[in-house]
Image (tube, helix red, strand yellow):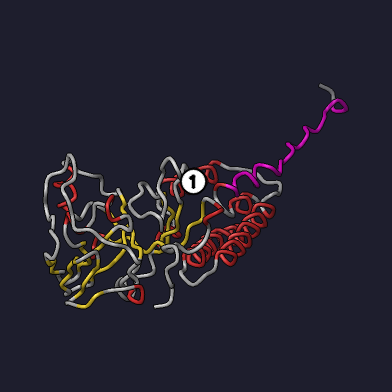
Amino acid sequence: MNEGDARTLPTPKLRRWPGALMSLFVPGFGLIRTGNIKAGVLWLLGIHLAGMATMAAVVADFMPIWGAVAVTAANLALYGTMISRGYKPGRMSNKLWFWFVAMLLVMIFAPSPAFLIGTAIQIPTGAMQPTLMGRSPEHPINDQIFVSRLSYLFSGPKRGDLIVFSTGPVPNIARLTGQQLPEEHLFVKRVVGLPGETIEIKDGSIYADGRKLGQEDGVPPIRYISAMAVSGMSRVHIARSGEAYVVGEKEYFVLGDRTENSVDSRYWGPLPEEAILGEATKIYYPFSRMGKPAYPGMREER
């Protein structure tokens, strides 16, 4: 080849869209791909902190639903800004590919930091109706709720709280149902008895240490029934009318609002504190029921 025939090879074109796509799955990696490692790491940390702050606001008992929606929208806008910052030309080396795959796997398999603050679950049954709705012929869509893990960080549940708990630490539930439920199987019930109290169900009312409980205590105007034999279940802690339950230290007596169709502390005894996951604070779906869960007509002030 003559010297005059020599040609310069074209420089490969660096594409922008892979950076935005990578940022979608690993926040900030689009900037790391361009060599701006410091900015990419700051975005990665910032997005996770913003996610934790958003979850804390969304599940907070005091935050109105419109406030939760506004905070969520702001967080989504921040995420979109981060992705747009990653929409820049860049080149991937073998080392960068290694770090991208490693960080992606961590984000897929490790729990999100926001999960330590709150989570969302679906109401599985109608045991808490009409406060929380499970699937039924008259209500074909299960309520979806937010659960705050921070509610009991510094103090225990209050009477009337709607708590979410794991069935794993409650051995009597497995004995009652005849099957070992998985650790992650969750129940939702209302706290009516506190540690150290003696709980009785008499004439449709709840008594704690001999005092009749009412709406001012967070107990709905329900005519409670004593536990009865449940088809297909062996008896464990079934109490008859007037029989007292003694709640131990670090235990709670919990009941379902649909008293005739709830398997609760009347059957399997007090709930150990270690089983409690958090407090049910908001219904976020269906949209027609968005807001703080409350028994119809019940006063919220306590």
Label 1 is placed on what type of residue?
Answer: Leu
| Residue at 35% from the left image edge and 77% from the top image edge | 216
Residue at the spot 31% in from the left edge and 59% down from the top edge: 189
**Nearest the eye: 115 or 172:** 172
Residue at the top extreme of this rendering: 1
Local SS, label 1: helix
Residue 8, percent from left and from top? 80, 33
For disc 1, the marked residue is 104
Between 217 and 3, the one nearer to me in the picture? 217
- Image side of residue 100 versus residue 277, left or right: right
Viewport quadrant of the C terminus: bottom left
Range of the magenta residues?
Answer: 3-24
The quadrant in which residue 255 appears is: bottom left
Magenta stretch contains residue 7: yes
Residue ranking furthest to the front: 203
Please tell me which residue is depicted at 62% across the width and 64% down the height of the picture: 70
Considering only vertical position in the picture, is 76 above or below 56? above
- Indicate the position of residue 157 as horizontal and vertical percent values: 31, 71
Image coordinates of residue 185 in percent, x first then y, are 30, 48
Asked if residue 128 is among those painted magenta in the image, a careful observer would answer no
Q: Give percent across and percent down for residue 288.
A: 56, 53
- Return the residue nearer the eye: 82 or 76: 76
Q: Residues within 10 Å of mark 1 (few under 14, many from 20)?
A: some
- 149 or 121: nearer the viewer: 121
Q: Residue furthest right?
A: 4
Position of the N terminus, as image quadrant, is top right
- Count of residue discs: 1
